[in-house]
Amino acid sequence: MYGGIEAGGTKFVCAVSNEGVIIEKISIPTTTPEETVKHVLEFFDQYEVDALGIGSFGPIGINKNAENYGYVLATPKKGWTNYNFLGTIKKHYAVPIAWTTDVNAAAYGELVKGAAKGKKSCIYLTVGTGIGAGVVIEDNIFSGIAHPEMGHIWVKRHSKDVYEGTCPYHKDCLEGLAAGPSIKARTGIKGQNLPKDHPVWEIQAFYIAQALINYTLTLAPEKIILGGGVMNQEHLLQKIRQQFVKQMNGYMETPAINEYIVRWGLPNESGIIGSLLLAEKEYKKKNNNQ
Ligand code: ADP
Ligand code: ZN
């Protein structure tokens, strides 16, 4: 039996699976680390898991040789900065634990069981309160000195956009210009209530398409999968595809645009399913090495 934790800034989803089937799943509101993790432990104490997979909101320490490995790093989420998340879970369960970001877990879930099933590589991008992405290449999550921070890349400004941007670090990076809060900041209206024909959607699409072009030029993945609250706007997906084709201007050949840039294949579950799959992968890795 495997356990998965999708640790989001708003809610935690915990689940256990047996032979690829989710047996039980709960959702816990994200409050203080102590309170939230207490509920997580109460849930997993009911089961005998063979391994755990954690996909956490970030940034997180993923360098095994660093002192902050397993910690949540500088986050605006109150009380979580420098919280030893992995260490706390490890203290309670002496099983192999996979530790990565929420978007990496989602990318992995989508590659194995979702929209990128049968492919060897994909990028999963979430456009929600923030923007973040995970990259899976040849069944492995890509990381180097840290996990990638693909939401904070630079984009060319739209000629009709004067909004300064919401990112506390960079103001007008991609996240600052195109995440959910930027829609509210420009229009006074939340994305979910903004009419489909509002000009701000073209601006959003212009920025997100640029990001997807940059990712394509850099990594050439087999698929790009879009998730997150803002991407519930079906018309936005169409606008992004159109802008992608227009701005790429025929430079790089990609699969048919409707197959290359797609919505998630595991709606709302990419992260938790990915976390469970990573638990399984970690378990097999540990047992094959013995
Ligand atoms: P989180 O990123 O916190 O996990 P979401 O992915 O739901 O959560 O993102 C929340 C953001 O997405 C908010 O800024 C919200 O206004 C926006 N949002 C949620 N639903 C929609 C929608 N249907 N259309 C456009 N924007 C949406
Ligand atoms: Zn930024």
Image (cartoon, rainbow, N blue to C red):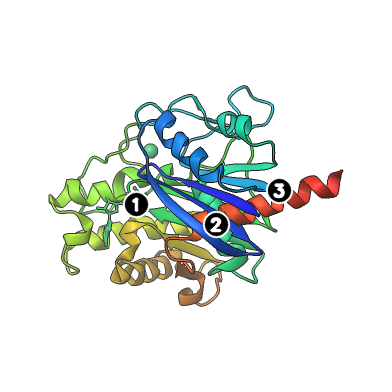
Amino acid type, label 3:
Glu
- Across and down, in percent, residue 235 comes to 29, 71
Instruction: Say which of 222 and 43 sits in front.
Output: 43
- Across and down, in percent, residue 252 comes to 55, 67
User: Quadrant location of residue 199?
Assistant: bottom left
Instruction: Say which of 85 and 136 sits in front.
Output: 85
Question: In 3D space, how far apart are the residues under numbered discs 2 and 1 (Cα atoms)?
Answer: 16 Å
Q: Give the residue displayed 69% in from the left and 36% down from the top.
A: 94
Instruction: Say which of 253 and 181 sits in front.
Output: 181
Quadrant observed for ligand 2 in the rendered image: top left
- Across and down, in percent, residue 52 comes to 62, 46
The answer as to whether callout 1 falls within 8 Å of ligand 1 is yes
Residue corresponding to mark 3: 282
Amino acid type, label 1:
Gly
Amino acid type, label 2:
Ala
- Across and down, in percent, residue 260 comes to 51, 71
Residue corresponding to mark 1: 128
Check disc 3: other Cα within 10 Å, few if <14, some if 14-19, many if 20+. many
Q: Give the residue displayed 52% in from the left and 53% down from the top.
A: 15
Considering the numbered disc 1 on the image, is that residue within a helix, a strand or a loop?
A: loop
Residue at the far right in the pictured view: 290
Residue 108 image label: none
Q: Give the residue displayed 60% in from the left and 48% down from the top.
A: 47
Quadrant including the C terminus: top right
Sequence-first tag of 2 and 1: 2
Sequence-first tag of 3 and 2: 2
Residue corresponding to mark 2: 107
User: Quadrant location of residue 19?
Assistant: bottom right
Tell me: residue 135, above or below residue 97. Answer: below
Contact (Cβ within 8 Å) of mark 3 with mark 1 = no
The answer as to whether callout 2 falls within 8 Å of ligand 1 is no
User: Quadrant location of residue 34?
Assistant: top left
